[in-house]
Amino acid sequence: MTDIQDSVVSQEKFDEMIKELENLKTVRRTEIAKNLEYARSLGDLSENAEYQEARDLQAATEERIKKLEELVKNTKILTDGKKKTEVSFGSKVSIKKEESTEVHEYTIVGSEEADMRVKKLSHVSPLGSALMGKKKGDIFTFETPMGKQTYTIERVA
């Protein structure tokens, strides 16, 4: 993951982070407080597994809240202001490996949003950074664990 200061996300991802943050601060904190109260009622806290588990959950939740607050404060929301002819944040890019007919399509996103299961590629990944600024028809090479790979950009949208 990149430094929080470098986070760039879509409006959709930003809204998702805000929603998660609000849920953690309201619903989740209340649930944890109730669990702690119940666990305390069970007696001796030094040997109370329910109490320790509730405290661990509280700590993890507070850590996530802190991280989300930092992200929300420092994240830039990507805008669709660039020309669709050049690969940038939010671009949908179709590429074809040299000597292959198979075309792969990716959406270029910030690192917080990257998810290869849904073909969302981080702009700081080796492939993502190699794509940035390229145009349809450009041929580019980048380093992979299996050596250098050469691709052609089939489409930028």
Image: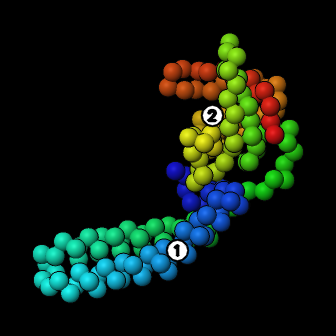
Label tally: 2
Estimate the x, y position of residue 115 in percent, counting from the top left.
57, 45
Q: Mark 2 or 1 closer to N-term?
A: 1
Q: For residue 15, what is the image quadrant?
A: bottom right
Q: Is residue 70 visible?
A: no
Q: Is residue 62 visible?
A: yes
Badge 1 crowding class, 10 Å Cα cut-off, few under 14, some 14 to 19, many 20 or more, is few
Q: Residue 55, relative to residue 78: is it above or below?
A: below
Q: Which residue is mark 1?
A: 23
Name the image colouring.
Answer: rainbow
Q: Identify whether 58 is placed above or below 90.
A: below
Residue drawn where x is 26% and y is 83% of the image: 38
The percent coordinates of residue 35 (x first, y second) are: 31, 79
Dot 2 amino acid type: Leu
User: Residue visible at 34% across and 70% down?
Assistant: 57
Instruction: Left or right? Give the position of 154 relative to 68.
Output: right
Which SS class for mark 2?
Answer: helix
Tell me the quadrant of the picture where the C terminus can be found. top right
Q: Nearer the viewer, residue 73 or 117?
A: 117
Q: Residue at x 73, y 48 (%)?
A: 89
Closest to the camera, between mark 2 and mark 1, is 1
